[in-house]
Amino acid sequence: MIEVENLTRVFRTYKKQPGFWGGVKGLFRREFEEVRAADNISFSIREGEFVGFLGPNGAGKTTTLKMLSGLIYPTSGRARVAGFDPTKRENAYRRIFALVLGQKNQLWWDLPAIESFLLLRHIYGLGAAQYQQTLDELIKLLDVGHKLNVMVRELSLGERMKMELIAALLHRPRVLFLDEPTIGLDVVSQKAVRSFLRDYNRRYRTTILLTSHYMADIKALCERVIVIHKGRKIHDGDIGRLDATGSRQKIIKFRPVDGVLSPGAFDPQFGKAEPAANGEYVLHVPGDQAVAVSQQILAAGPVADITIEDVPLEDIIAELFGKQG
């Protein structure tokens, strides 16, 4: 469904010298610097896949989505989405994809959402019956029927994002690009949006490419992740493989009864137990040694609490970024 080959986008920006005279010099001789927002990225996504697109701020995630949407042109490389070249911006292509930017609005701020939906119906040329059927289904799935006639500016952030999703899906796109759709939402709203996206993907086999800084989104929705850093792809594979990287280590958290770490509580070859809040200690150990080390801790003195945890996915990804410099 999506094929990306050596996609590159270079931004050329004017580098102003400081001060008044720096501005004057810039009138006669300007210095520019180039930033590679996307650098030779290649990947392919099958129809119906729900893929996470990860990277730190400035990694090139949004730039890549905008190139796939035809909003900006690549400097080099090529992309195909459902057989279309996004750079041609054909009307037929615009009808089969949708882009949702978590920090941008496509709804009219001073109008009720239902009026924006009616306008979108005419923009996409949707028949009355098809429009109403799709709208009723989306309203039911997102439980926002009682908010349709409320001015968009008066909606909560979570309610507004649900309306944005309805607007994006009214024309039943085959491909959905989501850029931080849960940013700023409370836990309840995040869960509702995740549940909706999961069900929608399974029901309609819509191909979805999702960027998010919330690892809960990625773990709940995506079986595969693509990780980019400084414009380059550094990982592409099953999310289970990424988790397996972290499974080679475990985190042991324990709290001695009196808050004092007993001498010889664990073999020092595993490192130093770092003190944490409430008298707790944290220790990173090889995954296959976690049980043995826990037994050492319990044998060395009374322990009020002890747990063995997996390394969080965000820590694994942060480590990947660190290895890439």
Image (cartoon, helix red, strand yellow):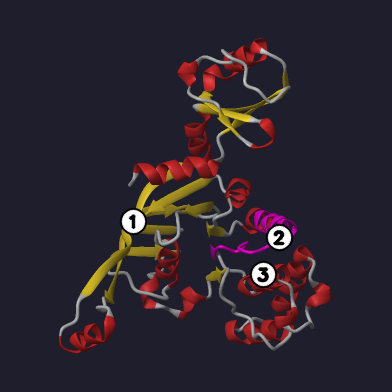
Mark 1 vs mark 2, CA separation in Å: 33 Å
Q: Secondary structure at mark 2?
A: loop
The image quarter in which residue 160 lies: bottom right
Q: Is residue 36 left or right of residue 200?
A: left
Rendered position, 140 above or below 48: below
The amino acid sitting under disc 3 is: Met
Rendered position, 13 above or below 273: below
Q: Nearer the viewer, mark 3 or mark 1?
A: 3
Badge 1 vs badge 2, beta-carbon distance below 8 Å: no
Q: Earlier in the sequence, mark 1 or mark 2?
A: 1
- Residue at image position (47%, 44%) is 317
Q: Earlier in the sequence, mark 3 or mark 1?
A: 1
Residue 119 vs residue 192, the one in the foreground: 192
Viewer can see residue 113: no
Q: Is residue 167 left or right of residue 73?
A: right
The amino acid sitting under disc 1 is: Ile
Residue 216's x, y, as percent? 62, 49
Can you identify the residue that label 1 sits on? Answer: 41
Badge 3 vs badge 1, beta-carbon distance below 8 Å: no
Instruction: State the extent of the magenta-drawn residues as a range.
Output: 177-198
Can you identify the residue that label 3 sits on? Answer: 161
How many numbered dots are placed on residues in this image? Answer: 3
Q: Is residue 108 left or right of residue 129?
A: left
Can you identify the residue that label 2 sits on? Answer: 186
Mark 3 vs mark 1, CA separation in Å: 30 Å
